[in-house]
Image (tube, grey):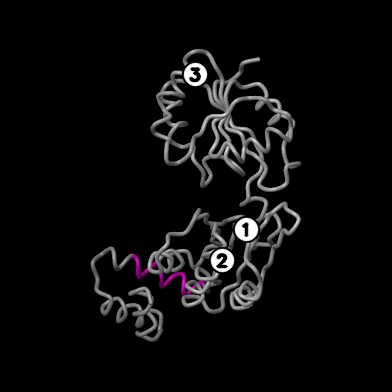
């Protein structure tokens, strides 16, 4: 039956029934399963009476495991990589070993399956298919503000923990007080919640309820008119040519008949 040496296998993000027949087949077939937390994975394996042994593979021991996994596969054995929930390599460990396996000529495949981002976005109406996925946001206010300013004209999706979600949304609210926001938590579980509303109403809702479960969040983009878009492009062009913010303000205010202060704010990112 051997087709591949290494299988990247998604696991359910909440509801254990969200698993494919092929996933069960592969997890039964391989000689070893690499997992983040054996206690979590073992619950899934026990549920489907899968007897395959597990070995820990997480972000703290990725590099240490490389030589062991390579030797294991060189002996002719097969292996699967799973996350605690969802798809490996998508905000989960796996990138290090996949790179090494490809460099060493091993045959790798990935199974389709559960992913919190797609599960969430399939419930959210958007203007088009484009979005930026950030993963987990950085921890500092300055870093979050920089990302939100950079992505202001893009639908921006990220993961957030329950203990940080309110603080993060308040940081974003300071920059974009009228932002439209979507949140999803406990996806596929009994108490799944998906909400889309103005940012202040989302914050009020979270502050009024017990916050549990990891969150997927979308900050909807600001709509901009064609003149604003042209001005932003011209600002970047002139900045790259070495013009000062003051000079850019004077030049573009004359060209577009726009107040100099407005262009200055665009130029310095305020």
Query: What is the distance, in whole Å, between disc 3 and disc 1 at their CAs?
Result: 37 Å
x and y percentages locating residue 74 in the rendered image: 47, 15
Contact between labelled residues 1 and 3, with CB atoms less than 8 Å apart: no
State which mark lies toward you, 3 or 1: 1
What kind of element bears circle 3?
helix
**31 sits to left or right of 149:** right
x and y percentages locating residue 194 in the rendered image: 69, 63
**78 sits to left or right of 14:** left
Q: Which residue is mark 2?
A: 219
Image quarter (top left, top right, bottom left or bottom right) of the C terminus: bottom left
Q: Residue at x 73, y 46 (%)?
A: 15
Start and end of the magenta stretch?
A: 226-236
State which mark lies toward you, 1 or 2: 1
| Vertical position of residue 236 compared to residue 122: above or below | below
Q: Which residue is mark 1?
A: 213
x and y percentages locating residue 263 in the rendered image: 37, 79
């Amino acid at each position: 039956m051997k087709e591949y040496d290494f299988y990247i296998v998604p696991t359910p993000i909440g509801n254990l029934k969200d698993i494919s027949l092929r996933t069960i087949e592969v997890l039964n077939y391989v000689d070893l399963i690499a997992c983040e937390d054996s206690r979590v994975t073992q619950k899934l394996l026990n549920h489907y009476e899968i007897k395959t042994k597990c070995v820990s593979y997480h972000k703290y021991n990725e590099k240490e495991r490389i030589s062991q996994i390579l030797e294991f596969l060189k002996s002719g054995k097969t292996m699967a990589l799973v996350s605690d929930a969802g798809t490996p390599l998508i905000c989960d460990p796996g990138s290090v070993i996949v790179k090494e396996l490809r460099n060493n000529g091993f045959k790798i495949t990935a199974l389709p399956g559960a992913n919190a981002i797609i599960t969430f976005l399939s419930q959210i109406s958007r203007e088009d298919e484009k979005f930026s996925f950030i993963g987990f946001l950085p921890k500092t206010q300055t870093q979050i503000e920089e990302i939100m300013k950079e992505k202001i004209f893009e639908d921006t999706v990220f993961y957030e923990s329950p203990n940080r979600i309110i603080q993060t949304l308040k940081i974003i609210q300071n920059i974009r007080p009228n932002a439209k926001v979507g949140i999803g938590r406990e996806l596929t579980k009994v108490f799944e919640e998906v909400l889309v509303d103005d940012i202040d109403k989302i914050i009020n809702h979270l502050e009024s309820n017990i916050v549990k479960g990891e969150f997927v969040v979308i900050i909807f983009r600001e709509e901009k008119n064609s003149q604003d878009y042209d001005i932003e492009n011209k600002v970047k062009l002139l900045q790259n040519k070495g013009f000062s913010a003051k000079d850019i303000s004077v030049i573009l205010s004359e060209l577009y008949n726009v107040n100099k202060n407005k262009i200055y704010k665009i130029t310095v990112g305020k």
